[in-house]
């Protein structure tokens, strides 16, 4: 068990990063920190995917020198997934940032609890 | 024909509810009256033309769960009784509702309630019964809420929540029966499948108990009776009358259907369910009487009396013995007439004098002699004094208790009934005594305050009917015994 | 007939293009394009439903030129087509019902965006329903989230923006877990297409290898989707998101968006993990417990609420609990009940939100209970529709809610260990439902002199159409549930 952790240290790092990101997204009060947490979480997943797609000793799946054997290259699908994931996470980040800007312009704070309190006060 | 009988009041009720305000009050009353009579006529025709146990299916809810109607002995009994109560109480309302608001709405819901009661009486299986039972809770709610005061709304909410809680206990049983029974159609002797049942008796008994308790909510059975004394009195008097007289009996109808037509009397005989049921009903009999004895408001006192009296009926059924069964049916009819009559009297007093407390009623008998004579006769019947209907029914209930062959209960039951009868005398008769003898003697010629003919006639009618039921009950007893013969095999001696 | 095989893919692409085209159109044109689009979608999905029902088997449509196991696929069976048809119908009715409010409350230059978002939302829902590829499902889950977020904050007030942020945060947590789960699943099996994964998972399960990672994976995906579909205790974003957005948005979010995720979960259970494997992981029991808790706590929160919109929102939490309870039974009957409740709840909740808009509209726009007194007299149609929706929620026979309860109870009775808790909680929760819905109905029918003006049906023709049709849908589900049940059973059969 313990040895596995050292052999698969990339996965372990990915999981730890995922946990850090997840906790930040969930627990931080500051909106920007939440967004950073989300990005850490996503990056952790991409690290995990990239690591899983990599096969030691093989090249990136771009045909060079006419070598067409499958055994020469790594699995290209995880790389594709990472690219797609990055697109998704970029758009989500953009959306979150734009909402954050709106809220900051209205309430001059990034703290979500304070914003809630201000909204309640505004309505009362 | 059954559809027509249900559709007429539904349509008439919807016309009243959705239509514009009526300018002429007489026309409004006339329309309601015509609709009521026509509906009752349609019910009678339906009773006459439909063959016994002929199923009239409306549609299928899902596989094996049709919404359908059929007519058997029990539905005949209840349908006729409903009509006898609903039409006069409706006529009484034309007089009474003059001083209330939103009459149109009242009549609309009154008619709709009649329709669902008819549907309830004719329901052929539990799912249909449940449908109409729920509708009944919802449609009679506006009657309780009628005057819109805070007290009425609180009472209405209480009524609603207790009713729904009861209905879901029933639903619980329904789910079990759907699994362990052959069908949900009401079948004399029960529908349980012995093969499926194997080893699950405990569960089924729990289901039966929940259903009895659930239907018992409407009948005001302890421990779920608290809504009844709150909800019945706040409604307008004619509505209180039918609520106590008939709606409470629908709970009884539910119990009859559950025990004798779904689980079967033999399944429950001698089990803990029967014991607990007996204890609960006897507790309610005593408790209701005592609460009524302590209560100061007239209508509220009558409502507590309903709690007590309806549990007489449940006790009779709980004996699972033919005399108790007969007594239960007789008391259903007698109590419906008596209690509706008494509420109408209370309404007449409120309408004419505005008095609601018992102690204010001294000398009322000299102002409203006919009304108070009817009150006295109805009270005597409710106490169980011959020659009124209440005596016959209580006689059978008592005999049912004695001959039930149950240890303890064969003594305890009749004893509780007797004590409660004494209490009944204690809370009803003082009103008559003070009404006729009390008050200011010096007034030689008290002002006459007799209510109008429209209000007086139903009261007199109920009094006469109760007396007739007491003097010649043979026909009714014979009819009920026929039903009992099929349902209860044991102990039928003749 | 063969051409129908192209319809699911066409339906998804059509929405996507309609959304893009709409972004260049005037609000009115965008609206008409959207409505026309949904009608066309309904026709397409109806054809698909008919085709699958007649042929009796699901079909696979290969997207692009790569065959399995590399390419991307769409798969349509009876259940998918039925749900897609239903989604389109409810969406159209919700949009119609809330149209007047939208035109009044949303800024003129932003109105077209609403329809762009609605088109994309429909696109992502259809994709979630039809796709046979897990990663595609993830991408569309995100598209769904983004469009839903836009729908929440189309009317920009502090409340809606805050609600949108909270919604986004919870959703992102959910999709993060889902993505992690499916990456691990890809790692374990080497496939992304559902049918291929299922084969590998079955092999893994049989060999007993990777037991713990498999369970963790399933757990991650389940929890992720549960968060996104607002299962208790992950429901904290619900009341704000449904409570302060426009009526159409709330109706669409509660009746369709959350159901899309649940349907994806059901698909994952049947088509990715395999029903038996899923059952063996005991995660069903966790879902069952959370479902039960949601049924009770959602209703309790609803009782305490003094804002009618938030009350309905909390009721959604309870109803989602019902669905998860059904899934958590771990039996076929429970699943049928859960799927039926997806339909039933969607119909009733959309009706409630739309009718609620009519009621609040007749009370000066206030959502506080004390202002609603007598609202049903001022807006008779909305009052009646709200009552119908409430009765369906409470479970009066003839309405769809009753059939749901019946199916849940039947499923519970067949399941030894879970029977008692399920039945008891079902009964308690139903009574709690009755408490707050009937309380509301009584209040709106309590006559009172009110400063607010009444609304007749002539001033709200679209709302009338929407309310009437949704009520009919509820009654149809309640009275003729047999054909729906048969289709659901048939569809579940095709999942295997």
Image: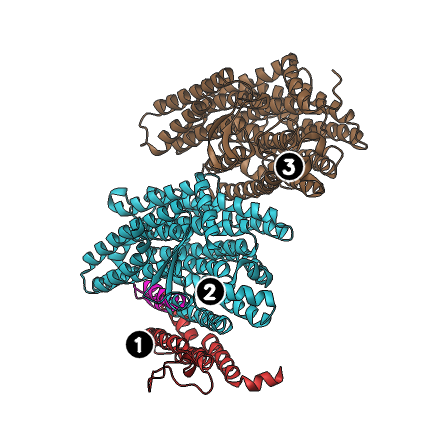
Chain colours: A red, B brown, C cyan
Total residue callouts: 3
Residue that mark 2 sits on: C196
Residue C332 in the image: above or below residue B185: below
Of B315 and B175, the residue lying toward us? B175
Determine the CA span between mark 2 and mark 1.
Answer: 49 Å
Residue tagged by mark 3? B212
- Comparing labels 3 and 1, the label whose residue is closer to the camera: 3
Residue B373, image quadrant: top right
Magenta segment: does it hold C161?
yes
Of badges 2 and 1, nearer the viewer stands: 2
Q: Are marks 2 and 1 in contact (CB under 8 Å)?
A: no
In space, the residues marked 3 and 1 are separated at their CA atoms by 63 Å
Q: How many residues crowd mark 2 within 10 Å: few (<14), some (14–19), many (20+)?
A: some
Q: Secondary structure at mark 2?
A: helix
User: For the magenta stretch, what is the residue range?
Assistant: C137-163
In the depicted view, which residue is nearer to us: C77 or B387?
C77
The quadrant of the rendering that contains the C terminus of chain B is top right
In the picture of the structure, the residue carrying the numbered disc 1 is A105
Quarter holding the N terminus of chain B?
Answer: top left
Query: Do discs 2 and 1 share a chain?
Result: no
């Amino acid at each position: 068990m313990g040895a596995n952790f050292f052999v698969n240290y990339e996965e372990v790092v990915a999981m730890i990063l995922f946990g850090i990101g997840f906790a930040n997204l969930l627990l931080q009060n500051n909106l920007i920190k939440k967004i950073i947490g989300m990005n850490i979480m996503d990056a952790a997943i991409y690290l995990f995917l990239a690591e899983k797609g990599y096969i030691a000793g093989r090249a990136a799946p771009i045909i060079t020198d006419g070598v067409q054997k499958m055994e020469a290259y790594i699995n290209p699908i995880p790389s594709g997934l990472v690219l797609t994931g990055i697109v998704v996470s970029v758009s989500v980040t953009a959306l979150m940032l734009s909402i954050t800007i709106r809220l900051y312009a209205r309430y001059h704070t990034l703290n979500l609890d304070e914003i809630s309190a201000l909204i309640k006060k505004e309505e009362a | 024909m059954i559809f027509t009988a249900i559709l007429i009041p539904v349509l008439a009720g919807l016309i009243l509810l959705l239509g514009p305000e009526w300018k002429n009050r007489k026309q409004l009353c006339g329309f309601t009256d015509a609709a009521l009579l026509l509906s009752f006529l349609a019910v009678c025709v339906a009773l006459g033309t439909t063959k016994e146990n002929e199923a009239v299916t409306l549609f299928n809810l899902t596989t094996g769960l049709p919404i359908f109607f059929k007519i058997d002995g029990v539905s005949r009994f209840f349908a006729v009784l409903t009509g006898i109560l609903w039409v006069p109480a409706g006529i009484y309302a034309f007089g009474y509702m003059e001083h209330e608001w939103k009459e149109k709405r009242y009549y609309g819901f009154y008619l709709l309630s009649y329709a669902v009661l008819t549907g309830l009486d004719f329901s052929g299986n539990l799912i249909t019964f449940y449908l109409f039972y729920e509708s009944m809770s919802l449609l009679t709610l506006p009657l309780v809420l009628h005057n819109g005061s805070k007290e009425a709304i609180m009472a209405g909410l209480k009524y609603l929540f207790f009713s729904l809680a009861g209905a879901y206990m029933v639903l619980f049983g329904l789910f079990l029966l759907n699994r362990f029974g052959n069908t949900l159609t009401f079948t004399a002797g029960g529908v349980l499948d012995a093969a499926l049942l194997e080893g699950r008796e405990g569960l089924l008994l729990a289901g039966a108990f929940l259903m009895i308790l659930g239907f018992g909510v409407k009948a005001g059975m302890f421990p779920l009776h608290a809504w009844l004394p709150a909800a019945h009195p706040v409604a307008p008097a004619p509505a209180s009358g039918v609520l106590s007289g008939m709606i409470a009996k629908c709970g009884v109808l539910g119990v009859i259907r559950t025990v004798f037509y779904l689980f079967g009397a033999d399944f429950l005989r001698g089990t803990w369910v029967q014991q607990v049921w007996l204890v609960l009903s006897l507790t309610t009999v005593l408790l209701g009487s005592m609460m009524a004895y302590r209560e100061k408001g007239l209508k509220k006192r009558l409502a507590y009396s309903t709690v007590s009296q309806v549990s007489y009926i449940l006790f009779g059924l709980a004996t699972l013995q033919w005399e108790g069964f007969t007594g239960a049916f007789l008391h259903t009819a007698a109590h419906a007439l008596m209690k509706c009559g008494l509420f109408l009297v209370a309404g007449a007093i409120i309408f004419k004098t505005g008095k609601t407390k018992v102690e204010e009623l001294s000398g009322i008998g000299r102002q409203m002699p006919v009304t108070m004579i009817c009150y006295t006769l109805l009270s005597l019947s409710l106490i169980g004094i011959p020659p009124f209907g209440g005596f016959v029914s209580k006689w059978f209930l008592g005999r049912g208790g004695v001959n039930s062959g149950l240890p303890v209960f064969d003594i305890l039951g009749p004893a509780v009934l007797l004590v409660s009868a004494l209490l009944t005398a204690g809370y009803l008769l003082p009103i008559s005594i003070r009404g006729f003898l009390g008050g200011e003697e010096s007034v030689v010629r008290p002002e006459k305050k007799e209510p109008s003919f429209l209000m007086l006639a139903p009261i007199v009618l109920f009094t006469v009917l109760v007396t007739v039921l007491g003097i010649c009950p043979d026909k009714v007893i014979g009819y009920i015994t026929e039903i009992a013969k099929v349902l209860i095999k044991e102990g039928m001696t003749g | 007939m063969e051409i129908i095989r192209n319809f699911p893919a066409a339906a998804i692409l059509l929405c996507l293009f309609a959304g893009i085209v709409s972004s260049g159109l005037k609000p009115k044109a965008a609206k008409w394009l959207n409505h026309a689009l949904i009608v066309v979608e309904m026709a397409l999905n109806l054809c698909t439903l008919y085709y699958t029902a007649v042929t009796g088997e699901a079909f696979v449509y290969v997207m692009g030129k790569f065959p399995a196991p590399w390419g991307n696929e769409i798969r349509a069976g009876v259940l998918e087509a039925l749900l897609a048809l239903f989604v389109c119908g409810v969406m159209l009715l919700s949009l119609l019902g809330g149209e007047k409010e939208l035109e009044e409350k949303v800024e003129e230059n932003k109105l077209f965006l609403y329809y762009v978002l609605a088109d994309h939302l429909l696109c992502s829902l259809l994709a979630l329903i039809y796709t046979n590829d897990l990663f595609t499902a993830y991408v569309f889950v995100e598209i769904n989230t983004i469009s839903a977020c836009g729908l929440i904050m189309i009317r920009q007030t502090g409340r809606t923006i805050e609600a949108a942020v909270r919604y986004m945060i919870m959703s992102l947590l959910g999709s993060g877990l889902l993505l992690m789960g499916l990456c691990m699943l890809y790692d374990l099996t080497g496939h992304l297409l559902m049918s291929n994964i299922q084969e590998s998972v079955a092999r893994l399960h049989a060999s007993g290898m990777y037991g713990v990672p498999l369970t963790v994976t399933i757990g991650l995906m389940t929890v992720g989707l549960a968060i996104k579909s607002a299962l208790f205790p992950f429901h904290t974003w619900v009341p704000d998101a449904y409570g302060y957005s426009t009526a159409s948005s709330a109706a669409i979010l509660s009746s369709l968006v959350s159901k899309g995720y649940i349907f994806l979960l059901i698909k994952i259970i049947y088509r990715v993990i395999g029903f038996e494997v899923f059952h063996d992981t005991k995660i069903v029991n966790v879902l069952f417990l959370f479902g039960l808790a949601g049924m009770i706590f959602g209703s309790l929160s609803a009782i305490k609420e003094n804002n009618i919109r938030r009350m309905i929102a909390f009721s959604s939490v309870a109803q989602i609990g019902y669905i998860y309870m059904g899934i958590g039974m771990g039996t076929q009957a429970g699943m049928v009940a859960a799927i039926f409740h997806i339909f039933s709840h969607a119909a009733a909740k959309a009706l409630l939100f739309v009718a609620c808009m009519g009621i609040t509209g007749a009370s000066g726009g206030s959502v506080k209970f004390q202002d609603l007194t007598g609202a049903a007299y001022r807006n008779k149609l909305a009052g009646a529709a709200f009552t119908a929706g409430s009765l369906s929620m409470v479970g009066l026979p003839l309405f769809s809610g009753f059939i749901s309860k019946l199916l849940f109870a039947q499923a519970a009775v067949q399941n030894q260990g879970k029977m008692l808790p399920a039945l008891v909680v079902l009964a308690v929760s139903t009574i709690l439902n009755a408490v707050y819905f009937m309380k509301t109905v009584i209040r709106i029918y309590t006559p009172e002199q009110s400063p607010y003006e009444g609304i007749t049906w002539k001033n709200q023709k679209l709302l009338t159409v929407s309310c009437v049709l949704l009520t009919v849908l509820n009654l149809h589900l309640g009275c003729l549930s047999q054909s729906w049940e048969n289709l659901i059973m048939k569809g579940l059969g095709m999942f295997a």
